[in-house]
Image (tube, rainbow, N blue to C red):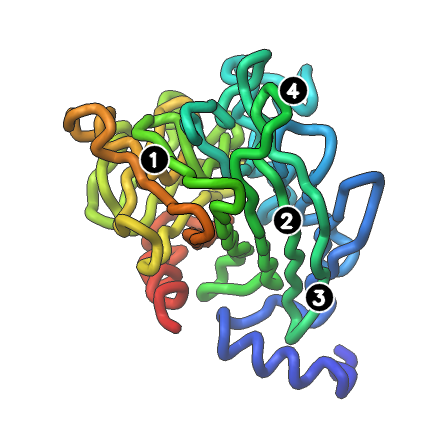
Amino acid sequence: MKPFPARWLFPLICATALWGTPVSAADTVMIKKGKDGQFDIKFGDRLFTTLHLKGQAKPILYPIIGPHDIAMTRDYPMKEGTPNEAKDHPHHQSLWFTHGDVNGISFWDLGKDAGHIETTAVEAVEHQEGRAFISFQDKWVDVTGKTQCTDTQKITFYPPAREGDLEYYMLDYEITIHASEGDVVFGDTKEGTMGIRTHPGLRIDKGAKAVNSEGIKGKAIWGKRARWVDYDATINDHHVGIAILDHPSNPRHPTWWHAREYGLVAANPFGIHDFERKPAGEGNLKVPKGESVTFRYRFVFHEGGTEAAQIGKRFEEFATP
């Protein structure tokens, strides 16, 4: 085996301290501009995911290729014809952030009455210490063309790492909502917010396991508060999973989870009426004009089950400043 070039040594030392043992120096993360509004995120020559800033109702990451080259999310509706995929909920587009009631407007759904999130600028694409990040700005536009609010999103991508013999990939989402046009109210509805629609093999109703940080399992995790949720299953003879972690700095941490048996997993800090049968509107969150609110999440795409992948440890790493 050839020694690592000297220019790789410092990034590798920092990477080890920050997020575990890198799999290979050749897996340093790179973000490459692709087609109009697309950015490919690669580990060396391997595609991890593509960020789509145009062509959809909101920014999405699709596809997401996990360990053993297994797709972590379903193809529909971006691509049709994949075996064993349901054609329900076309607004469940791989991985995304949005909400079903923003000033009374649904940005969660698709259709003639729904709003959309339009990217207005890519602020930065940077590579540092083996990882990479992209930041961009959006406006949330209703069906009349009126902007309800704006946001700044930053997505950080980490190189592959290992827990023992098991490989895992991570990305962090940071979303700041700016009440730039007036007060913004995130309404009390289960239809939100930081979501992913899993590969069909990672559906509870197809045999996948699910557990949250409080030890609640299966479909009972729906509507419960937890620091994290993890789904895992065997796909193509490999044991893989997806965990979503809710940062302690987020409003109303630990969040509630709109986590369904058919493969939707979404962190939702607003849907208290649906989740706890509290009076309608109790989950509303108001951001006064000129102010902002920030949400942070980590996704872990891993080999092995919850314990073997040390999802609790991954959360502690995320929670530590």
x, y percentage for residue 221? 25, 34
In terms of sequence position, does the residue under pointer 3 or pointer 4 come before the other?
4
Q: Is residue 158 above or below residue 184?
A: below
Give me the residue at 43% from left, 53% from top: 291
| Residues packed near mark 1 inside 10 Å, few (<14), some (14 to 19) or many (20 plus) | many
Horizontally, residue 89 falls left or right of residue 145, namely left
Question: In what quadrant of the picture does the N terminus appear?
Answer: bottom right
Residue that lies at the very extreme toward the right in this rendered image: 35
At numbered mark 4, what does the secondary structure look like: helix, strand or loop?
Answer: loop
To which residue does mark 2 refer?
A: 137
To which residue does mark 3 refer?
A: 126
To which residue does mark 1 refer?
A: 209
Residue 71 visible in image: yes
Q: Amino acid at mark 2?
A: Gln
Q: Amino acid at mark 3?
A: Glu
In terms of sequence position, does the residue under pointer 4 or pointer 1 come before the other?
4
Q: Is residue 90 above or below residue 176?
A: above
Question: In what quadrant of the picture does the C terminus appear?
Answer: bottom left
At numbered mark 1, what does the secondary structure look like: helix, strand or loop?
Answer: strand
In terms of sequence position, does the residue under pointer 2 or pointer 3 come before the other?
3
Q: CA distance from mark 4 to mark 2?
A: 33 Å
Q: CA distance from mark 2 to mark 3?
A: 16 Å
User: Depth-wise, is mark 3 or mark 4 nearer the camera?
Assistant: 3
To which residue does mark 4 refer?
A: 82
| Residues packed near mark 4 inside 10 Å, few (<14), some (14 to 19) or many (20 plus) | few
User: Depth-wise, is mark 2 or mark 3 nearer the camera?
Assistant: 2
Q: Amino acid at mark 1?
A: Lys
Q: Is residue 237 above or below residue 42?
A: above
Q: Amino acid at mark 4?
A: Thr
x, y percentage for residue 133? 64, 61
